[in-house]
Image (cartoon, grey):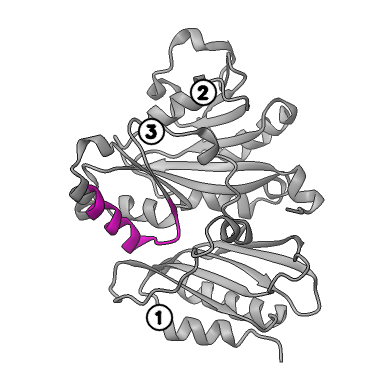
Amino acid sequence: MAESSQTAEQVPVTVLTGYLGAGKTTLLNRILSENHGKKYAVVINEFGELGVDNDLVVDSDEEVFEMNNGCVCCTVRGDLIRIVGGLMKRRDKFDGIIIETTGLANPAPVAQTFFVDDTVRAKTRLDAIVTVVDAKHLPQRLEDSHEAEDQIAFADVILLNKTDLVTPQELEEVERRIRAINRFAVIHRTERASLPIAQVLDQGAFDLQRVLQREPAFLTDDEHEHSDEITSVSFEVEKPIDPERFNAWIGLLLADKGPDLLRTKGILAYANDDRRFAFQAVHMIADGDFIGPWKEGEPRISRIVFIGRNLNRPQLRRGFESCQAA
């Protein structure tokens, strides 16, 4: 698929999240130690939490550890923007960046970093938010932790881990509950976070057109009951989008409803433009860019997804439809 020259040069960033004990450490250990043919810079909160064998560490300074498979491992003792800026000086040494959030963290502030800082945004692109979920303990976590629910809501890719610890019936119920929160994420069922690294990294999950090619039913707009908890809705329009109308509408919407809108993402066909426009937002922080041309003969349908709390489906639909060019 054609990409803009800027997109091709930007380093893909994966944000890895998941509640305490879900299996993030196991997944990170695999990324840092397996010979998967790629080199990643992994930014984590405390190096000691990883439990990586000492002989895996080849070269280290205060904050950056180089692993013997070529990956780079960093600790966040300071500002994330500063860490990423330092990594970009080693740009030729790795294929992508992975940022691990703490088990109790909402991933939104980390994701927003890649929208709000111009230098970071110019050199990197947020590729996907990956959430590791504990199949056995998720029902309890959803009862006692908003963070666990938010981590699922923000996810583009979900590792439903520890599937060997539950019955098939329990697994189906857990997946149903995940789908009730976020029906747009790709779910992989795993034991010990074991799956090909290529299914976790470099997913291009913010490029909805790429996702639709892989999962044509991605934006199937199922009806569902509304509640105060997290839900997801999506809409599509066939007429071209007027960029001024869209910017005015989405700006007001995010300013008014931003705290409830955890994730917004869309692929838009602007009037009088042959390029696809990718839009994304985390709460009130938004970003967008052209990501290459529409293919010849491809239907130029604009689609948008909202994941959040207290979503007003009719209001959101009317707003998006009002952005169509006259």
Distance, label 3 to label 2, CA atoms, is 14 Å
Q: Mark 3 vs mark 2: which is more N-terminal?
A: 2
Q: Is residue 140 visible?
A: no
Residue 312 disc label = 1
Q: Is residue 242 above or below residue 18?
A: below
Which residue is rendered at x = 57% and y = 46% of the image? 203
| Magenta stretch bounds | 171-186
Q: Amino acid at mark 3?
A: Ala
Residue 114 at x, y = what percent?
61, 49
Residue 53 location (% of width, % of height): 43, 12
For disc 3, the marked residue is 193
Image depth: mark 3 or mark 1 in front:
3
Is the magenta region chiefly helix, strand or loop?
helix
**In the rendered view, would you say 12 is above or below 115?**
above
Amino acid type for the residue under numbered disc 1: Asn
Q: Amino acid at mark 2?
A: Leu
Circle 2: element type: helix
Residue picked out by circle 2: 32
